[in-house]
Amino acid sequence: MDNSPGALALVGSGEYLPVMADLEKWLLEQAIARGKSNRFVQIPTAAGLESPESLNYWKELGRKQAERIGAEQIFLPIFNREGAMDESHIDVIHNAGLIYLSGGNPIHLAQSLVDTPVWNAIKFNWENGSSLAGCSAGAMAMSSDVPHFFRMKEEGEPGLGITPHIRTIPHYNKFFGWIPDKAAKVMMKAPEGVVIVGIDEDTAMVCESGTSSWKVIGKGSVHILLGAPTQKHSAGEIFNLES
């Protein structure tokens, strides 16, 4: 057993789309090189409050991406806490190459998964070499504190704790691109020791296995807004986060 964490990606938007195919394929390859399977496990829990039509849309989008990158799609029907308590999902998650928490409602995602057999399996497999990614709501829920997206100055809800020192703002250029980063950070608040990071759409920050640094992948930038020196990092740049 490879008992060190796999690659980790926080994505601003674009899961399962062609623009993110190279990233998702790379995440799979990182895990496969460590003996994991070519399974692309898609966790749609953040969209669990959406309509059946919307959930089918996410499933089909994921199917096309898995086909595009040559992976086996596993779309787990975990839409709420009841689904996350179902231990039958554990075997499918075990040794997956890539486990992906897609977008929707970050608070519903965190409340559904925390302290459940499914989340314990996800965390265990990531800690032992599987790649883990979260897009939009999935990235927000990775923190120990999940903010209400439109009430950033309020205290958040308990998160999943994978990146306890990072509070992620996805779709950053869509919602805050019209104002300078120094002005945007006035609207932000986070617990002591937590760094607020804005990630543009179609952009990800990735931490490779065994490292503490992050690399920007995609079309946009990553913005360090609070808790560390204000900076903007473009595609290909590598940086560290120190509060």
Image (spheres, rainbow, N blue to C red):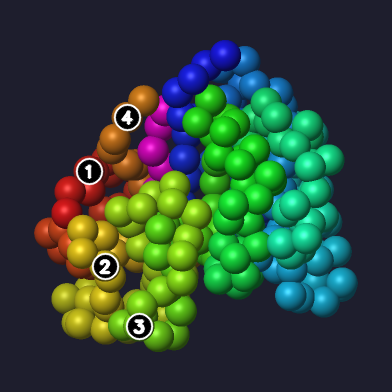
User: For the residues marked 3 and 2, what is the alpha-carbon distance in whole angstroms?
Assistant: 10 Å
First along the sequence among labels 4 and 2: 2
The region drawn magenta spans 204-209
User: For the residues marked 3 and 1, what is the alpha-carbon distance in whole angstroms?
Assistant: 26 Å
Helix, strand or loop under label 3: loop
The kind of residue tagged 2 is Pro
Determine whether, in the image, residue 63 is placed left or right of residue 116. right
Residue at x-position 42% and y-position 57% = 143
Tell me the residue that label 4 is attached to: 211
Give the image location of residue 201, x and y in percent. 48, 64
Decide: few, some or many residues near mark 4? Use Cα within 10 Å; few <14, some 14-19, many ≥20.
few
Tell me the residue that label 2 is attached to: 191
Give the image location of residue 30, x and y in percent. 53, 26
Tell me the residue that label 1 is attached to: 240
Choose between 71 and 118: the one closer to the eye.
118
First along the sequence among labels 3 and 1: 3
**Quarter placement of the N terminus:** top right
Choose between 220 and 60: the one closer to the eye.
60
User: For the residues marked 4 and 2, what is the alpha-carbon distance in whole angstroms?
Assistant: 24 Å
First along the sequence among labels 4 and 3: 3
